[in-house]
Amino acid sequence: MDVLPMFPLGAALLPAQPLPLQVFESRYLRMMEVVAEGDGRFGVVLIERGTEVGGGDERFPIGCVASIEQVRPMPGGRLGVLARGRERLEVVRWLPEDPYPCAEVRFLPDLTWSQEQSGRLAETEHAVRRAVSVMSEYRPQPWPADVELAEDPVARSWQLAGIAPLGPLDQLTLLRASSVEELLERTAQLTGDALDLLALQFPDDPE
């Protein structure tokens, strides 16, 4: 069983997705020091109840390994960290926090690609990019509709799930996907649902 330092967040992290962090709590500053001196990996899980600051939160068991790519000091003793999602994980057991969260985890199987999924990938990408473009007319989006994505089709599928205008619980649903086909289908479905909800919120504005 692998043991990883854990960083519970109010957002879900998906494989191949960048994760920018501003770290300021003393326990997580210490955690980043230890992680950076080691293999650069830590786990990220979505908080179910509670907040990111202060502890005492409840967490979903499915998450993602993050691998540090950059660390830079910031004013006020903070750290700017850029990490990226890697393999998925499931928390088997939470360990005592000393001083930061750690857990025994098992890694979930990587999704495998088949050329038969190429059409589905193209359809989902069209749906997601269109949704991001439409949503940007109503509220700022973290990604532009023409954002460049990975050439690798599995990584690209995960990145589409990451840029889709969805909430963290929807992204957690996608994180549980057992195949690329399921991931792409659910991403397209949830993205369409988000656009339908937007139409209800702004009934007089055409998409």
Image: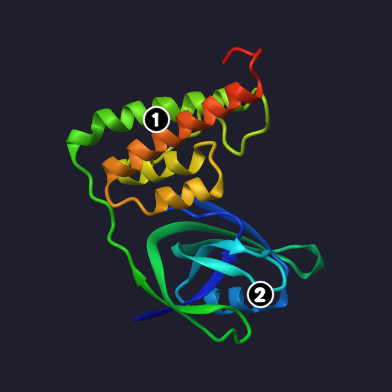
The percent position of residue 8, horizontal first and vertical second, equals 58, 66
Q: Depth check: give the residue in front, 184 or 70.
A: 184
Q: Which residue is mark 2?
A: 56
Q: Label 2: state its secondary structure.
A: loop
The percent position of residue 195, horizontal first and vertical second, equals 53, 26
Q: Please, what is the three-letter code of the amino acid marked with disc 1? A: Glu
The C terminus sits in image quarter = top right
The percent position of residue 130, horizontal first and vertical second, equals 49, 23
Labels 2 and 1 touching (C-beta < 8 A): no
Q: Is residue 9 left or right of residue 120?
A: right
Work out whether residue 90 can be spotted.
Answer: yes
Taking 162 as reference, is 206 above or below it?
above
Q: Label 1: state its secondary structure.
A: helix
Q: Is residue 190 left or right of residue 96?
A: left
Taking 200 as reference, is 140 above or below it?
below
> How crowded is the residue under tag 1: few (<14 C-alpha within 10 Å), some, or many (20+)?
many
Disc on the earlier residue, 2 or 1: 2
Q: Which residue is mark 1?
A: 125
